[in-house]
Image (spheres, helix red, strand yellow):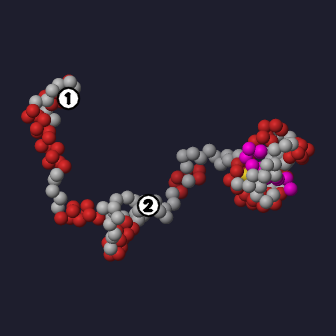
Amino acid sequence: MPEAQKQKIREGNLGKIMSIEARQKISLAQKRRKHKPLSEEGRRNMSLAKKGKKLSKEHKKKLKENWRTGKMKGMRGKIPWNKGKKYPQFSGKNASQWKGGITPINIQIRTSFEYRLWSDSVWNRDNNCCQKCGENITYKLVAHHILNFSSHIELRLAIDNGITFCRPCHKAFHKRYGKRNNTREQLLEFLQQMA
């Protein structure tokens, strides 16, 4: 772009009246842009894009094949660069976030398969509903430890030490009685209160 044009743009043309010749030039350029004739292939593509137009079975088959092989735009059908590759240089001790294998025991237990089994067993025993309010939407349920998880290590995965609460009731229980030194008496008192 010439320097004179850049200067005009910088100064701005706001509030200035264009000459008739300038208006005609812009109008002509716009008309050319809008009414550019299409080639035969362009016309065919335009007609396929029309709403409600039925495609032939052969055309659908070609489209599917091109989509699957990745000839069309997008990533569908393409094989990821790291498929089937393992990178030991970036895993375990060599990972950037490695902190010496210090995952807390609490997290190890709560993410274990046995803990998931315990939780499911408690839910099934209580018919998948909150024992306080009767809520039965599964994603809202929590398996609550009657005698708290941190103090009673031997009872962490005992099914008799669990009860099903919905999230609001579970939160209300811990808000009232705290998270430490919970007892069965507190649970019975909580369940006897009006919902």
Please tell me whether mark 1 sits on a helix, a strand or a loop: helix
- For residue 80, which numbered disc appears in the image? 2
Q: Residues within 10 Å of mark 1 (few under 14, many from 20)?
A: few
Residue at the spot of label 1: 9
Depth check, front residue: 123 or 35:
35
Q: Does the magenta stretch include residue 12?
A: no
Stretch of the chain drawn in magenta: 160-170
- For residue 162, which numbered disc appears in the image? none
> Going by the image, does 52 lie left or right of 110?
left
In the image, residue 13 sits, relative to residue 55, either above or below, namely above
Question: Looking at numbered disc 1 in the image, what kind of residue is underneath it?
Answer: Ile
Q: Residue at x 79, y 60 (%)?
A: 127
Residue 173 x, y percent position in the rendering: 80, 42
Residue 165 x, y percent position in the rendering: 78, 50
In the image, residue 191 sits, relative to residue 3, either above or below, namely below
Q: Does the magenta stretch include residue 167?
A: yes
Depth check, front residue: 4 or 107:
4
Quadrant location of the C terminus in the rendered image: top right
Front of the two marks 2 and 1 = 1
**Can residue 95 be seen in the rendering of this structure?**
yes
**Can residue 143 be seen in the rendering of this structure?**
no
Question: Looking at numbered disc 2 in the image, what kind of residue is underneath it?
Answer: Pro
Q: Residue at x 15, y 56 (%)?
A: 37
